[in-house]
Amino acid sequence: NPTFRGMRHSLMRSFDDIYVLDLHGNSKKKERSPDGGKDENVFDIQQGVAIGIFVKRGQRGAHQPAVVRHAHLWGPRELFAGAGDTKQLVSGKYHWLAEHDITNTEWITLKPDKPFYLFMPQDIDLRAEYEQGWKVTDIFVTNNIGLTSGQDAKTVAYTFDEARKLASLFSLPEDVIEAILYRPFDRRFIVYSKLVITRPRTEVMQHMLAGRNVALVTTRSVEIGRGWEHIFCASDLIQLHTVSLKEVNCFFPLYLYSNLGPNNRELFFTEVDISTTAPGGRRPNLSPAFIADMSARLDMQFVADGGGDLQTTFGPEDVFDYLYAVFHSPAYRARYAEFLKIDFPRLPLTTDADLFRALCGFGQRLVALHVMEAFGAALPSFPERGNNMVEKIEYRVTPDEPERGRVYINAAQYFDGVPPRVWEFHVGGYQVCHKWLKDRKGRTLSYEDINHYRRVAAALAETITLMEQIDAAIEEHGGWPLR
């Protein structure tokens, strides 16, 4: 975890030798042994466990860091042979630990280095390649974490009318109600006033209210075991757990506004003074150094608003589209998996203008799908009439149509034509198709709700196709690393 980099560095200065035996067994991450077999914890807990042995001899100079050694131990907790009086522990973690010590363990010597000083093996060459990319916090000048209401049940509602009733309970006017992306594809409404919101994050969120905008939503690290899927975009406010419940969610708007418009009311603590280069009082929230690097690599001029012609010019929206496409590449996520788990994602830049144009096209479509300004074609049906109440959510497939799939909301009603890959698709920590319905258990779906869910499923189906096409385009232009 990047949080403990200082602690690891201090331990390396304080000791002469450090031995870390990772016993794994993290059930939260659903860890498996490298051979695909079962991996169990040595204790009856969910959190993974390690043995750390720290040796201080007092002979090395203070300037010499500790020698750090690491080993893995995977598998079941214990395996027995025989029965009754002949039953013996013959394998598993307990047996291995009983038979080994420091001298007969196959250690790997690490070279922990800044900025993280990690006590775990990493591919050094791949890390150097990855770190040539731009970290998103260095791309977007202004960013923050998502807002925290402190009382979602009293401030966040599924519909505008429900939010208006909440506002009236606080004697607040209707104009404090704003749209919020509460979960992926789950747009709700919030009573957005400093009188009721604990941490409104106005210094960033105000730029989503002042005019048309889009923002990247991601996390600094990943705690779950599925891998890095923690990327989405929003055209509304976001909260602390929009993309993932386990991790803090961060927010990177594409544009900053100096003219805060009609929403510049009592909500805002200060007005940000921003020099602008575009009509409407906005400028791109992009680092000049990043823009200069991308411009030089592509041999294109940067325009400060909208998109360029992608022949001689590119704009902030092209940057966002390119970035969004790269982060949706399955090959990118797999290649840099171990680095994406511990810090903000980094964006590799290309010098291939044709690849840049192709990725901008894919990213533009993904953004439109994810903010629901465009809709996929593979719409499921909702064929049965009934009370539309979400009671018991169940996914079923039949042997004769394994790719079709039905999502039942009660005993009689279902969405028909939801493929397994769509049903299982995750954004961050959420299984989108299941989560959206789960949050509405006990509610009656409106006509708009039913159509929205159909469009979400279609958007996910096209997202899966676009992700495959992104990888194919990158391979056609030389593959990884990007050139």
Image (cartoon, grey):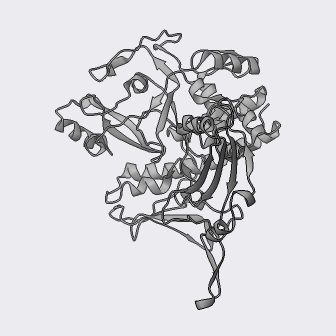
The relative height of residue 298 versus residue 61 in the rendered view (above or below) is above
- x, y percentage for residue 25? 57, 61
The mark total stands at: 0
**Could one spot residue 226 in this view of the protein?**
no
Q: 303 or 237, which lies in front?
A: 237
Q: Which image quadrant: the C terminus?
A: top right
Of the pair 222 and 94, the residue shown nearer to us:
94
Q: Nearer the viewer, residue 96 or 415?
A: 96
Of 305 and 288, which appears nearest the observer?
A: 288
Rendered residue at 66%/41% (across/down): 16
Q: Position of residue 136 (x, y in %)?
A: 59, 29
Query: Which quadrant does the N terminus fall into?
Result: top right
Q: Is residue 263 left or right of residue 142?
A: left
**Residue 367 in the figure: left or right of residue 436:** right
Q: Is residue 375 left or right of residue 289?
A: left
x then y, percent, for residue 426: 55, 51
Q: Position of residue 248 (x, y in %)?
A: 46, 40
Residue 439 visible to an observer of this rendering: yes
The picture quadrant where one finds residue 424 is bottom right
Q: What's the residue at 43%, 25% (across, down)?
A: 204
> Toward which corner of the image does residue 327 lie, by quadrant?
top right
Left or right: 173, with 292 as reference point: left
Q: Residue at x 53, y 25 (%)?
A: 254
Q: Kindly indicate the quadrant of the structure image that contains residue 176.
A: top left
